[in-house]
Image: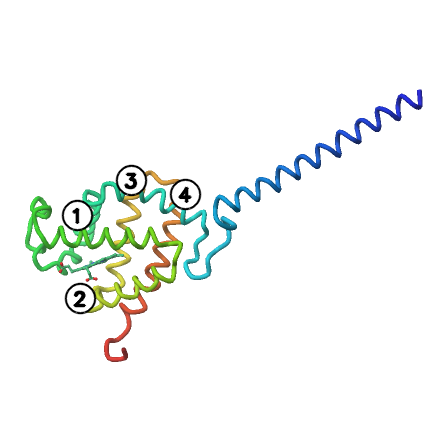
Amino acid sequence: MLYYLFSIFLMLTTYLVLKRIKTRHKQIMGTWFSYMWWGGDPDVVNPVSGLTRREIHAVQKSWAPVNANSFATGSELLRRLFNTYPDTKEYFKMVRKLPEEEYSQNPQFKAHVINLMTSLNLAVNNLNQPEIVAAMMTKLGESHRKRQIKEKNFHELKEVIVKLFIDVLRLDDATLSAWGKTVEFWYKHIFVTLNSPEETR
Ligand code: HEM
């Protein structure tokens, strides 16, 4: 009887130990695979961009359909910006007197749509090299300062972008939050030069 009980005890203990080893092994393999897949820890925050690899992936994935339809999305974005904040239209000399139906025929409107979307596309695609994106944004701040564009106009554009993304892309909360951080990162660098007085540089 004692021998019988001891055998059961031994079998049970062996089963539990093996199960534990298997789970641990699975965890290690999982972590290793995830590390290889992401090219590093997916949840470590990059000190320059403030973004994790997982967040960059979410932003780039959600950007793909926007970029596939770049001109249409960019035109809708600018149209919404001009309608919601009519003051912003004043910066576009050749557009400000035009009715909405004629925007899409106007070369200046088209040029800014293409410029805006190309620049955003570069900024999204290069998020894994945040120093490069930071330098691009610093240049953008400089060129927009020369056009008297204000920080407030960028915030208005951000609001319109987020609303458009919610309406069209129906993004989940994690992706929206990643977008929020991305725009924050871009704007931080744009504003350095946008707000710097010309004579000090
Ligand atoms: C992240 C946001 C923005 C991006 C990526 C962007 C991108 C660009 C680019 C690449 C250009 C052409 C090259 C240059 O001058 O740097 C440009 C021109 C211009 N941008 Fe923006 N822009 C942004 C926001 C704004 C805002 C908020 C306004 C004003 C409401 C604005 C008004 C203009 C104007 C007036 C021009 C000149 C258009 C022309 O004369 O053809 N931009 N933008």
Q: How far apart are marks 2 and 1 (CA)?
A: 20 Å
Residue under label 3, please give it.
65
Label 4 Cα crowd, 10 Å radius (few <14 / some 14-19 / many 20+): few
Which callout, 2 or 1, points at the residue further toward the start of the chain?
1
Depth check, front residue: 2 or 197: 2
Which callout, 3 or 1, points at the residue further toward the start of the chain?
3
Depth check, front residue: 92 or 114: 114
Amino acid carrying label 1: it is Arg
Q: Position of residue 158 (x, y in %)?
A: 29, 53
Q: Which mark is residue 11?
A: none
Q: Position of residue 83 (x, y in %)?
A: 17, 49
Give the foreground label among 2 and 4.
2
The residue lying at 17 percent from left, 52 percent from top is 82
Q: Are marks 2 and 1 in contact (CB under 8 Å)?
A: no
Identify the element where label 3 is drawn: helix
Q: Distance between the residues labelled 4 and 3?
A: 18 Å
Residue under label 4, please give it.
173
Residue under label 1, please give it.
79
Total label count?
4
